[in-house]
Amino acid sequence: MTSPQTIRGRYGDAVRIVTWNLWWRFGDNWEARHEAIAATLAELDADIVCCQEIWAEQDGANQADQLGDALGMNVAHHPRFGRRGLSFNNAILSRTAIIESSSHSLAVGDPSSPEGQQSGHRTAVVARIARGGGEMAVICTHLEHRFHLSEIRQAQVSTLCELAAPHHDPEGFPIVMAGDFNAVPSSEEIRLLTGERPPPVPGLVWSDVWAQAGDGPGFTWSGQNPYLHQAMWPNRRIDYVFVSTPRPVPQGNITSVRLIGTESVDGVVPSDHYGLVVDLVD
């Protein structure tokens, strides 16, 4: 992990945030994909990167630390190793100092139940990040992926909002929550976040960055991606950056958002998901 970076001024700048599902070690070219991911992120020059499906070896390499070293960023990563000594998890990278970070299970119900077993490996990383004499909270997550388990995702969304609530200050910098939610904008789980249904935490709702400033459908799971030519699932927008509201406008207002990872690097497409790069008023 690199040492903390100099804290930038809070006002008058933009804060650039990336979210991206990196597709773990799937595919026979995962090592080449790692290099393509690092090269793509280097070009973006983001302030904060939220990564899902980060891999780590219990006795060896750690993708989050490798990306942090390559990009000169601090790392918040809490690997959870399985029986094969590998971790499948989330990480947050930051140019400025990470004051504190923690990892939280998104398991639903009894761990021995089918629901608990299906959701047991899902987590959220919560980080407090230094910003110009103050701080901002960032949450990086990855929800249950199966189509028919919307109820589990809704419960996970409720947990995320409860994790966010202690950091919510309507007069301070908004919370950023990003990741792979495995749900489309019209789903009940996303409607819980955006205020189209009563929110899990009263008074805390979220702006969907792409809905506010994106151009086109914004499919992050797309048949245009060569890894998905044989996929059974349709084109979907399932990866998000959310900004908490209410907030002191213009802080947290979205100035731009676009897809990333849509182009190959030296002939290698980085991931099965496209990511997002977002610029917010700082």
Image (cartoon, rainbow, N blue to C red):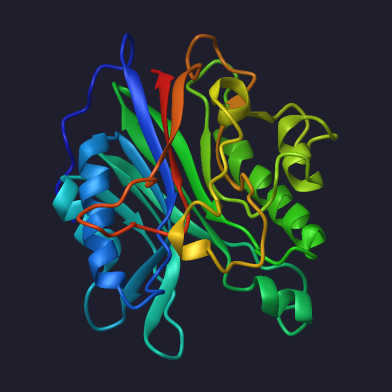
Q: In which quarter of the image is residue 22?
A: bottom left
In percent of the image, x 55 and y 62: which residue is there?
A: 123
Q: In this view, does 259 lie above or below 243?
A: below
Q: Position of residue 16 (x, y in %)?
A: 35, 29
Pick the quarter of the image with the C terminus: top left
Q: Position of residue 10 (x, y in %)?
A: 32, 17
In percent of the image, x 36 and y 70: which residue is there?
A: 55
Image side of residue 120 versus residue 252, left or right: right
Would you say residue 96 is visible in this rendering?
A: no
Q: Is residue 203 above or below residue 190?
A: above
Q: In this view, does 168 lie above or below 20?
A: above
In percent of the image, x 34 and y 78: which residue is there?
A: 28
Q: Which residue lies furthest to the right in this view?
A: 198
Q: Residue furthest bottom?
A: 83
Q: Where is residue 222 in the image (x, y as percent from the top left)?
A: 55, 51
Q: In this view, does 35 lie above or below 112?
A: above
In percent of the image, x 47 and y 14: which residue is there?
A: 251
Image side of residue 177 versus residue 235, left or right: left
Would you say residue 30 is visible in this rendering?
A: yes
Q: Position of residue 17 (x, y in %)?
A: 39, 34
